Image: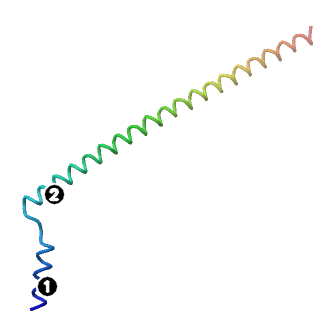
């Protein structure tokens, strides 16, 4: 008898919800999932924009360094060429 009573009690506690309760729970969970995905999407979009901006800044700095190096090389070549003329003449 005690076993049957315990079984019935546990069965009632663990019994599935009614159809309406189940649908409401599913709607709530679905809405929470949508909100979480939306927030995560916004976070990922912000992260992507931040990474793109950092990439642009990096490329800009590298172009400046490269341009400076090319200019320095040209100037060194020009000076070397000029000093070669001075020693010959």
Q: Quadrant of the N terminus?
A: bottom left
**Classed neighbour count for the residue bearing mark 1: other residues with Cα under 10 Å, few (<14), some (14–19), many (≥20):** few
Quarter of image, res 79: top right
> Residue 83: x percent and y percent?
87, 14
Q: Nearer the viewer, residue 23 or 59?
A: 23
Residue that badge 2 annotates: 25
Residue sitting at the far bottom? 1
Rendering colour mode? rainbow
> Residue 12: x percent and y percent?
11, 75
**Classed neighbour count for the residue bearing mark 2: other residues with Cα under 10 Å, few (<14), some (14–19), many (≥20):** few
Residue 64 appears left or right of 22: right
Tell me: residue 7, above or below residue 28: below
Residue that badge 1 annotates: 6
Q: Nearer the viewer, residue 62 or 45?
A: 45
Residue 36 appears left or right of 19: right
Tell me: residue 78, above or below residue 39: above
Q: Residue at x 38, y 42 (%)?
A: 43
Q: Nearer the viewer, residue 6 or 52?
A: 6
Q: Residue at x 12, y 72 (%)?
A: 15
Residue 19 appears left or right of 42: left
Quarter of image, res 62: top right
User: Which numbered disc covers residue 76?
Assistant: none
Marked residue nearer the N-terminal end (2 or 1): 1
Tell me: residue 5, above or below residue 15: below
Residue sitting at the far top? 89
Q: Nearer the viewer, residue 59 or 26?
A: 26
Q: Quadrant of the C terminus?
A: top right
Q: Secondary structure at mark 2?
A: helix
Q: Secondary structure at mark 1?
A: helix
Q: Tell me how far mark 2 sits from mark 1, CA to CA.
A: 28 Å
Q: Residue at x 65, y 26 (%)?
A: 66
> Residue 64: x percent and y percent?
63, 24
């Amino acid at each position: 008898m005690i076993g049957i009573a315990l079984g019935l009690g546990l069965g009632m506690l663990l019994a599935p919800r009614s159809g309406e309760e189940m649908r409401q729970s599913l709607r709530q969970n679905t809405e929470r999932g949508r909100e979480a995905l939306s927030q995560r999407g916004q976070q990922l979009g912000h992260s992507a924009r931040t990474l793109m901006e950092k990439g642009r800044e990096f490329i800009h700095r590298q172009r400046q360094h490269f341009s400076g190096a090319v200019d320095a090389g040209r100037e060194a070549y020009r000076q070397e060429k000029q000093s070669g003329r001075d020693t010959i003449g």
